[in-house]
């Protein structure tokens, strides 16, 4: 039984220049204590899809489809119901820890706010629990740090505070949107270890939104690849990296420099405009395998191996990669 | 070896800071030396705050070094005036990290690329036009983009404009400061390929600054690793990746994620404790000692004396007391060697 089931999620923004179709009929599930990696380049809709689930998007956004979490229909829940879910059952960690923390409050107060609001703890209890949480995310001398302001902490430390806030109410799902992108590699390694640790100790399911395939290879159980608002491939992590089927996934994997691998693969052309939904495979204009069929019809997702789904008329490993 | 294009000797850059009751000196770069040969690509790697961009700015003389020497094609440019420097500027050019803020939004892309040629008096009129056309073609931009403004272009296209501008005056040295960090993976690949092709074709030298080890491995001939204003290790690329000696280099290599779940999950990571110390008061002796996993073994020497860069193999220099003593810190063994 899945913890979160999303079915046919579409997000459209109405702008002065007409509609922008950010997400197009996205469906996926998330199991208990599963780590789902969501991969794609800027503008593919990976962040928007998850923000839309908790209705964190501005009013110009129209969200359609269904999203069921723990028997609750998220997209039609009352604002009060949503407030009891946001931060408590489903928590977010954003990319930029400096702009997501309030610079005017001590970190202890910011973690404490979550505890007092959702769990009704007293000021004193909230403070004690905040110290425990800082310790949980392995911040040294938490008794001192709890009274510091965000600017007194380093970038990696701030991200740990964000994670402490997110896991404060022991949520069922942690959605981490590019949590390590702004950090140095040695700091990133520590944050990824922490995510793994949280999943093991607290059993939290984690959605890891990232453009970094290395990060996904490190911690995800299952991976979802998005392109131009659509899901193009989905598979368990080992399966995806060993047998990528979609030409876009193949292209992404070939574009990362690796020791011994020759010239980097380029994906010609650029990401399509999202102003209209193409009645074709969105990747077709950049795809070496595109033909008449992919230019006139949207490929359905089909299962090519157990749990491995691809939206492509010509799935398979790359000729170039196998040659 | 022929005459080097760039020689940096004992480079020091300190920034005085005042305010909030505290005052002091930020030791951004302290005694950094390296040489770049003709046609050589040197990668300068380090994390935020290591001083790598300050090195680039000193080399370009965008800031004046506090001490040391910078020689370009044998000419000492460390303290030349702006006026005296101007004719020499055609020998070095820079590509910046952010293609959104490093192009003038009020100039067309054609004007941006032709400006260095005009300033240096290298071409005018029809000749200028022809040269700009050639440059656009060379970096893979359609000719009609010459009449467009930067905001009409994608990030990758803008970085191509930046490259065309930098290469317009056929510089001997290209300084590239994180040129692909702001771009998406697939766009990064095309810019890196382009840079490699252009280098082969035109033969310029390059100081390539980045925090991404994989990029360096793909592109550079030699790598210098910086930590807190100092170079801790320099070696030919293959050697550095196969046998990293400095504990910091080893931890850096072990922390870089590889897009392969089997390899990634199989490797042992060296996790560094603590944060980067403040460059206002760098640690005494070895600057890495406060985070070094082998600090116990290197103490007390590492507290008292700064380790000099010592040659351990041909062209491979390491600044570590343990390595100097003949011990081999082995925190992390790269997979290629382990197999």
Image (cartoon, rainbow, N blue to C red):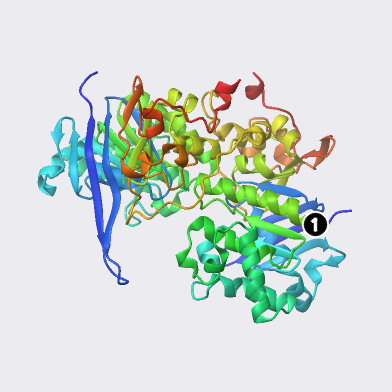
Counting other residues with Cα less than 10 Å from the Cα at mark 1, is it few (<14), some (14-19), or many (20 or more)? many
**Outermost residue, front direction?**
B300
Task: Answer with left or right where residue B12 lies relative to residue A17.
Answer: left
Between B220 and B324, the one lying in front of the other is B324
Residue B56 appears in which quarter of the rendering?
top left
Task: Answer with left or right where residue A113 lies relative to residue A202.
Answer: left
Residue A9 appears in which quarter of the rendering?
bottom right
Q: Which SS class for mark 1?
A: strand
Query: Which residue lies at the image location 30% right of the left edge and 68% below the top edge?
Result: B22
Tell me if residue A258 can be seen: yes
Tell me if residue A93 can be seen: no
Task: Answer with left or right where residue B315 lies relative to residue B77.
Answer: right
Q: Chain of mark 1?
A: A
Task: Answer with left or right where residue B139 lies relative to residue B68.
Answer: right
Residue beneath disc 1: A6
Quarter of the image with the C terminus of chain A is top right
Task: Name the spot of residue A21 as percent of width and height, x first.
Answer: 66, 57
Task: Name the spot of residue A218 as percent of width and height, x first.
Answer: 65, 41
Task: Name the spot of residue A179 as percent of width and height, x first.
Answer: 59, 54
Task: Name the spot of residue B338 as percent of width and height, x first.
Answer: 59, 22
Between B51 and B249, the one lying in front of the other is B249
Residue B207 appears in which quarter of the rendering?
top left
**Outermost residue, bottom direction?**
A122
Query: Which residue lies at the image location 89% right of the left edge and 53% below the top edge?
Result: A1
Between A140 and A315, the one lying in front of the other is A140
Looking at the picture, does residue A61 appear above or below residue B250? below
Q: Number of marks in the image?
A: 1
């Amino acid at each position: 039984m899945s913890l979160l089931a999303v079915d046919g999620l579409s997000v459209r923004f109405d702008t002065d220049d007409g509609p922008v179709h950010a997400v197009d009929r996205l469906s996926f599930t998330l199991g208990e204590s599963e780590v789902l990696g969501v991969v794609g380049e800027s503008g593919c809709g990976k962040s928007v899809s998850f923000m839309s689930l908790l209705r964190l998007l501005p009013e110009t956004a129209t969200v359609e489809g269904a999203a069921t979490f723990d028997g609750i229909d998220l997209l039609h829940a009352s604002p009060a119901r949503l407030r009891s879910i946001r931060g408590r059952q489903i928590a977010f960690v954003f990319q930029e820890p400096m702009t997501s923390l309030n610079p005017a409050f001590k970190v202890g107060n910011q973690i404490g706010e979550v505890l007092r609001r959702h769990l009704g703890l007293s000021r004193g209890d909230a403070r004690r629990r905040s110290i425990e949480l800082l310790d949980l995310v392995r911040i040294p001398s938490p008794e001192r740090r709890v009274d510091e302001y965000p600017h007194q902490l380093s970038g990696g430390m701030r991200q740990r505070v964000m994670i402490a806030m997110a896991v404060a109410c022991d949520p069922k799902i942690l959605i981490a949107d590019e949590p390590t992108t702004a950090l140095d590699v040695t700091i990133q390694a520590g944050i990824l270890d922490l995510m793994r640790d949280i999943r093991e100790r607290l059993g939290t399911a984690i959605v890891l939104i990232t453009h970094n395939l290395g990060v996904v290879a490190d911690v995800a159980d299952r991976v979802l690849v998005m392109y131009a608002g659509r899901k193009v491939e989905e598979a368990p992590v080992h399966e995806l990296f060993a047998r990528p089927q979609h030409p876009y996934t193949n292209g992404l994997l070939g574009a990362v420099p690796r020791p011994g691998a020759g010239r980097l693969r380029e994906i010609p052309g650029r990401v399509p405009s999202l102003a209209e939904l193409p009645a074709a495979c969105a990747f077709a204009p950049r795809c070496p395998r595109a033909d008449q069929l992919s230019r006139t019809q949207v490929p359905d997702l089909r299962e090519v191996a157990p749990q491995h789904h691809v939206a492509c008329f010509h799935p398979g490993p790359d000729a170039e990669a196998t040659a | 070896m022929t005459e080097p294009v760039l020689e940096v000797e004992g480079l020091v850059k300190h920034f005085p800071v005042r305010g909030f009751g505290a005052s002091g000196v930020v030791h951004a770069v302290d005694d950094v030396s390296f040489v770049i040969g003709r046609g050589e690509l040197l990668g300068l790697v380090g994390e935020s705050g290591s001083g790598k961009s300050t090195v680039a700015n000193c080399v370009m003389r965008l800031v004046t070094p506090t001490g040391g020497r910078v020689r370009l094609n044998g000419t000492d440019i460390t303290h030349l005036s702006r006026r005296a420097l101007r004719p020499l500027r055609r020998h070095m050019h820079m590509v910046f990290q952010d293609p959104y803020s490093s192009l003038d939004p009020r100039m067309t892309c054609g004007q941006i690329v032709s400006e260095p040629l005009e300033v240096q008096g290298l071409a005018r009129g029809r000749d200028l036009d022809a040269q700009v056309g050639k440059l656009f073609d060379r970096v893979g931009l359609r000719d009609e983009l010459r009449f467009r403004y930067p905001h009409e272009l994608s990030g990758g296209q803008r970085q191509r404009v930046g490259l065309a501008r930098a290469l317009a005056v056929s510089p001997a040295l290209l300084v590239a400061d994180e040129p692909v960090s702001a771009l998406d993976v697939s766009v990064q690949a095309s810019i890196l390929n382009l840079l490699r092709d252009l280098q082969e074709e035109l033969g310029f030298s390059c100081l390539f600054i980045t925090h991404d080890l994989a990029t360096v491995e793909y592109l550079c001939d030699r790598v210098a690793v910086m930590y807190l204003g100092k170079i801790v290790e320099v070696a030919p690329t293959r050697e550095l990746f196969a046998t990293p000696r400095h504990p910091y280099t080893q931890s850096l290599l072990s922390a870089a994620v590889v897009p392969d779940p089997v390899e990634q999950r199989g490797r042992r990571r060296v996790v560094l404790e603590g944060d980067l110390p403040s460059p206002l008061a760098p640690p005494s002796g070895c600057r890495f000692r406060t985070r070094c996993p082998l600090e116990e073994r290197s103490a007390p020497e590492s507290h008292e004396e700064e380790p000099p860069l010592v040659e351990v193999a041909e062209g491979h220099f390491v600044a570590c007391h343990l390595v100097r003593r003949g011990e081999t810190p082995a925190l992390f063994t790269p997979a290629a060697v382990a197999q």
